[in-house]
Amino acid sequence: MWKLDEQKAIEDAEAAAELEENMMQTNIAGERPKILEDSEDEDGRPVTNLVTQDIQLLRTRLTDTIRVLDDFKNLAEEGRSRAEYRASLLRDICAYYGYSEFLADKLLNLFPPREAQAFFEANETPRPVVIRTNTLRTHRRELAQTLINRGVQLEPVGKWSKVGLQIFDAQVPLGATPEYLAGHYILQAASSFLPVMALAPQENERVLDMAAAPGGKTTHLAALMKNTGCIFANDANKDRAKGLIGNIHRLGARNVIVSHYSALEFPRVMGGFDRVLLDAPCSGTGVIAKDASVKTNKTEADFMKLPHLQKQLLLAAIDSVNHSSKTGGYIVYSTCSVTLEENEQVVQYALNKRSNVKLVETGLTFGKEGFTKIQGKIFHPSMKMTRRYYPHTYNVDGFFVAKFKKIGPTPPNAVGVNEATKTNGGVKSTTTEIEVVDRTPIGADSDEESDFGGFDEDEDQKYMERAQAKTMRRKGRDPKAIAPKGKKGVNGEAKEAIKKATKKDTKESAREVPVEKNGVASVKEKAGRKEKKGGGVEVAKPATLNGIAVKEVTVESKKARRKSSEKKSKA
């Protein structure tokens, strides 16, 4: 019996200790947590509530602050304002997660306090590894079975995707399997599927991917279009464009043309597309788990320059679309950022500057609605059709997707329109449809400045000669026995030029040619006619080769020579 009593006493003691610990951590007894302290000591020097290195106590205070903000009326200390608690929360977030105060404040404004903590916490863990099946070469079921046989643990990424596979563990490098090298799949974040799914390209359409590198979205477009139609994959960075070409070849996308123009040059370079995808360059606040440097290297200037560029790119994308397309007329704008400046404000700007577009449903089955009202800002009611994605809600990178439908031509007085109504002569076109390609001539690419788009004429000549030699061998002829056509020596070219020039001069008539005779200049009325009597001289026009005089032909009569020599001897 005494053993049972002893055992019960031990259990009661453990339970009491556990209860006391829980009360200390969560203040379950109902007392108001002491979070805010005086900011100065007795000598007037600033003090900090906690030592930065005490991570556990810092996290406890952060949790307590959030609990107070959730129930401010009952748990806040007397005489303390909500702003004070929020300032304390901001300092703790910066200290605990390592953000700059500027960026932490910007992100904190997007969420309620508890959800904000979940967002910051989710950015500390990487997103799952995901691969996209290339349906141009295989099927997801076949690929999954093959990888399982190689020791890869995986499962479908979700019901919303028919091509994604989430990888949990792999015994082999995913970037070096035979299936990867054969182009059966590509390593791609699940969030990158979303803008392509929203664009929903159809077969035999003309599609523009304005910022295509490294090619995940471009090859996804090609797979959805089943290698039909034409995709223009553009990227301003020529080095990234080379990587784009590699993925296009590996995945077998045969309907893609690669360019490296600045995206701002569209539609002057080319327009009239059925659909345009703009995955705009952004601050990367949605992919902090991949790049932790974003926490500290983003400044206020970045959130002024980037939105300005994004607005201009979006206007160019809208102007590049053919509104009268029977199957298209759509634009998708996406970023891997969660800030207002790069998302809703950019979309609102486009709606204000282009009255010929409207927001439509993205067709995505999940995602939070875009903001229509936040931080004193009011956006168009249709902004709720845009979609936001967060790492703490869907376990994907932070992302934003908006889909536009172009319903008419761009107004002539619209801001940012290329002067497509002007011809080279400065005369305005009479048509009211300005969705034509700008007629301004584009300067030729400089081969010296760019090694991507230039042509090597010497190398091309070698290829042509090699191909010609192969053709002759197939016909049983010796390539070395026959000189290449069009090749002549310098002497041959000079002789031929002189011959043509002489023949031309003999046909000319009534041309006055000054002739030097006995030191006095005289004029013969007909230089093309030969003199038979007297000491006449016939002068042919100098022959030229590539603008350089080759030889001067002068014919004197024997009689004139004889008289001239006699006079010299007498003298």
Image (cartoon, helix red, strand yellow):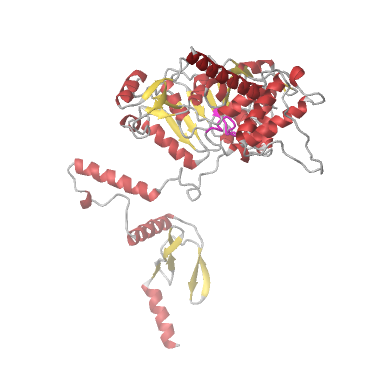
**In terms of depth relative to the viewer, which is nearer, 520 or 341?**
341
Looking at this rendering, what residue extends furthest in the top direction? 1
What segment carries the magenta color?
A: 278-289
Q: What residue is shown at x 47% (from left), y 42% (from top)?
A: 239
Find residue 47 and report its horizontal and vertical position in percent: 74, 40
**Looking at the rendering, in which quadrant would you find the C terminus?**
bottom left
Find residue 548 and report its horizontal and vertical position in percent: 45, 62
The secondary structure that dominates the magenta segment is: loop
284 within the magenta span = yes
Looking at this rendering, what residue extends furthest in the left direction? 476
Q: What residue is shown at x 53% (from left), y 20% (from top)?
A: 394
**In terms of depth relative to the viewer, which is nearer, 73 or 216?**
73
Looking at this rendering, what residue extends furthest in the front direction? 2
Q: Quadrant of residue 163?
A: top left
Q: Quadrant of residue 489?
A: bottom left
| Residue 419, visible in the rendered structure | no
Find residue 229 and report its horizontal and vertical position in percent: 43, 23
Q: Quadrant of residue 288?
A: top right
**In terms of depth relative to the viewer, which is nearer, 564 or 77?**
77
Q: Is residue 200 left or right of residue 347?
A: left
Find residue 420 and report its horizontal and vertical position in percent: 62, 31
Count of labels in the image? 0
| Residue 35, visible in the rendered structure | yes
**Whether residue 411 is situated above or below residue 523 in the rendered picture:** above
